[in-house]
Image (cartoon, helix red, strand yellow):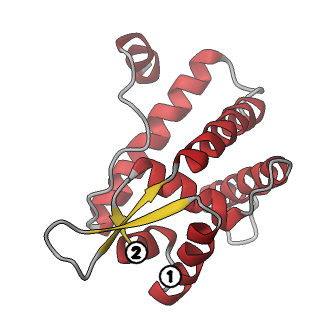
Amino acid sequence: MSPDDDGYIGYVLSDVARLMRMVFDRRVRGIGLTRAQWLVLTRLYRRPGASQTELADMLEIDRASAGRMIDRMEKGHWVERRADTVDRRINRLFLTPEARRVHARMWAIAEATVDDALTPLSPLERARFTGLAARVKERLQSMAGTDVVPVAEPLAPRARRAAAL
C-alpha cells in the first residue's frame, strides 16, 4: 500500500471515526449539544469524580481550556465540582441530574448512529468487527501505557463466540 491508497487501514479508521463524530454532531445539535459538551458528558458519565486535570487529559486539551469548559457547564447546571475528600486542592467533577437526563437522550442518538453506520454489516460481521476493534484498542492502550477503563461491558458468551469466528 502507498500513502495515496484510500484503502490504507490508517486512513479508513481515521475517516470512520471522523465521519461518525460528524454525523453524531449533527444529530445531537437537535437537542442543543456541542461536541465539547457531549465529550464532557460522555467522559464524566463513564468516570464520575474525575479531576479537572484528568478530564483535560481525557479530552486531550490543556487544563486551562478544560477549566473554562467546566466553568461554562457548571453555570449551565450540568456539572458540579466537589472537593476531594483527601486533597482539598482537587475538585472532583460530577454530572448533575439534568446532565444525566441529557446524557440519556444523547446515548439513544449515539446508539441509533452506530446502528445506522453498521447497517451494511450482518449481526455476525458486527460482532467480529467489534471484537477485532476491541483487540486493536487493547493493544494500542498497552503501547500507550494507559490504564483506560474499557468502553463497553464484556461481550456476552454468545457474542464472544461469534466474535471469535
Hey, which quadrant is residue 109 in on the image? Answer: top right
In this view, the residue in front, 6 or 40, is: 40
Rendered image: mark on residue 67: 1
Q: Is residue 117 left or right of residue 124?
A: right
Pointer 2 or 1: first along the chain: 2
Q: Is residue 31 left or right of residue 86?
A: right
Q: Residue at x 77, y 27 (%)?
A: 120
Q: Residue at x 60, y 47 (%)?
A: 98
Q: Residue at x 39, y 31 (%)?
A: 153
Dot 1 alpha-carbon crowd within 10 angstroms: few under 14, some 14 to 19, many 20 or more? some
Location of residue 1 in the rendering, given as x and y in whole percent from the top left corner: 64, 62
Query: From what the image shows, is residue 71 above or below residue 28?
Result: below
Q: Is residue 66 left or right of residue 109?
A: left
Q: Which residue type carries mark 2? A: Gln
Location of residue 82 in the rendering, given as x and y in whole percent from the top left corner: 34, 66
Q: Which residue type carries mark 1? A: Gly
Q: Is residue 15 left or right of residue 158?
A: right
Dot 2 alpha-carbon crowd within 10 angstroms: few under 14, some 14 to 19, many 20 or more? some
Classify mark 2: helix, strand or loop.
helix
Hey, which quadrant is residue 10 in on the image? Answer: bottom right
Query: From what the image shows, is residue 77 above or below residue 64?
Result: above
Say whether marks 2 and 1 touch (CB < 8 Å): yes
Location of residue 165 in the rendering, given as x and y in whole percent from the top left corner: 44, 19
Q: Which residue is mark 2?
A: 52
Rendered image: mark on residue 150: none
Q: Residue at x 78, y 49 (%)?
A: 28
Query: From what the image shows, is residue 147 above or below residue 81?
Result: above
